[in-house]
Image: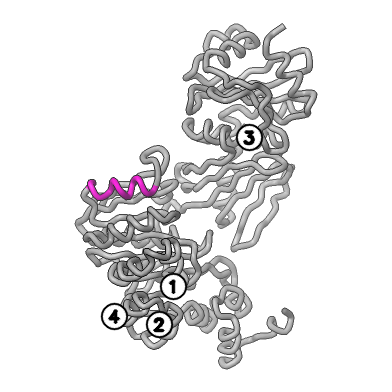
Amino acid sequence: MARLDRFIQVLYDQSADSLTLVAGEPAALLIDGAHKPITRDPLTVAQILGLLKEIAPPEVGQRISPSSEASFEYRGPPGLVSVDLRPGRNGCTAILRRETAAAGAASRGADVSGSRAEVDRLLRLLVESGGSDLHLRTGEPPILRVSGHLERQEEAPIEAAKLEAMLLGIMPEEDRGKYLDTGDVDWAYELPGVARFRANAGRERRGPLAVFRVIPAKILTCQELAVSKEVQALCGLTKGLVVVTGPTGSGKSTTLAALVDHMNKTRPDHILTIEDPIEFVHQSKSCLVTQRQVGPHTKSFKAALRAALREDPDIVLVGEMRDLETVSIAIETAETGHLVFGTLHTTTAASTIDRIIDQFSADRQAQVRVMLSESLRGVVAQVLCRKIGGGRVAAREILLTTPAISNLIREGKTFQIPSIMQTNRRLGMVTLNDALMELVDAKLVEPGEAYAKAAEKASFAAALKAKRHDTSFLAEA
């Protein structure tokens, strides 16, 4: 009897989705999306390879090594299992899945090439449909997000084992171990001639899940995105902090890519980007462009940002200012003669400033207000709205730092910023409500859609009524 037979028996007895053998970790069962250890001690690479060689066909067993990929089937006393061996972060990873006759036929077709082809088909469908996201869930058919709405496809629900094979089939080797270990991983995937995709894989109660976000192959220009000339002027600065904000899925990455491309065409400087993962790929034009990804190229945003000061950048893009230290270093970098672009998940310019300051302890906030009042050059807060007739369009709130704005930041009176913005429209400042109203006036967005995205709903509703726009949706609410 092979030593793995007792583990396979447990796999069948507990009706688990799979048995995972990861170097440096205990053997574990995947049950309802969670890993349950079934051994006390972690497995070594030698132990995993030895266990697999006992059950592999002779021609496959000869090729098994820590750096090889192998797939085969084994029929033990409890039943049939499919075995997938992949190189992993700590040495190697093996996944054993129990199979019924029907599941066996499915998994035999779910080898690496078959899994990749299935994912590629769905990603092509996403792009051809003009969608933004592909959702893959255990027990659900593929789901596309098109013009902001989720659309289930008329396909069979995806089983847990098949979905995991699909994800592992397109996941970089260095991320497979992380996914199996932690249950979460981000990476970028490219379909040549179609698009790049930002991918996230995780687990929920029913099994694996994944979301793919389209990153267009072509970087849209500032003109195509209707980015105002005042925001484009921020790209000509030599130092300072510019923050692009908005909820997840609001198009921040697309806007930032257009701004980076604008600088790449018009400045003879060094642009350094720090991203997780790299989304839009920029070829050096007038600028030298260096793109670093958290994980493969650097440990973290803050580590890369600290190192950036020794890498002679003129312009630094921080994909996400997600923690106190990253925010602090970004402000210091902007103060020391660099132009820094960063992102946050806030909805308005004033709340962006409050969010930055509130990350610091109370005894440091006065100092940070002074630093921010001197280094902040602009905030672009955007949301995406569904267009009449299909597609989406961005509404952008634009804050440009003036002496009056700097004084309000320094004195902690950010609640007065919207009124200053409204009285300085000639300088290019726009509140979110005004930006939304412009879209409604241009008949690009329905009043109800704009109202749903408005920051100050009461005043926006009053403005709609004053301009005699349809407000029947208010009565329905």
Residue 164: assigned label: 3
> Which residue carries the number 4 mark?
403
* Amino acid identity at mark 1: Ala
The first of marks 4 and 3 along the sequence is: 3
Q: Which residues are magenta?
A: 301-311
Q: Is residue 191 left or right of residue 48?
A: left
- For the residue pair 67 and 261, the one nearer the viewer reads as 67
> Which residue carries the number 1 mark?
349
Which percent across, then down, holds residue 201? 58, 42
For label 2, the SS is helix
The first of marks 4 and 1 along the sequence is: 1
What colouring style does the render use?
Answer: one colour
Residue 373: assigned label: none
Mark 3–mark 2 Cα distance, whole angstroms, equals: 50 Å
- For the residue pair 420 and 192, the one nearer the viewer reads as 420
Q: In what quadrant of the picture does the C terminus appear?
A: bottom right
> Which residue carries the number 2 mark?
421
Which percent across, then down, holds residue 450? 57, 76
Q: Residues within 10 Å of mark 3 (few under 14, many from 20)?
A: many
Q: Residues within 10 Å of mark 2 (few under 14, many from 20)?
A: many
**As drawn, 18 above or below 329:** above
* Amino acid identity at mark 3: Glu
Mark 4–mark 3 Cα distance, whole angstroms, equals: 55 Å
Q: Residue at x 61, y 14 (%)?
A: 52
* Amino acid identity at mark 2: Met
**Hey, which quadrant is residue 34 in on the image?**
top right
Judged by depth in the image, the label closer to the viewer, 4 or 3, is: 4
For label 3, the SS is helix
Mark 1–mark 3 Cα distance, whole angstroms, equals: 41 Å
The first of marks 1 and 3 along the sequence is: 3
Mark 2–mark 1 Cα distance, whole angstroms, equals: 10 Å
Q: Is residue 372 left or right of residue 458?
A: left
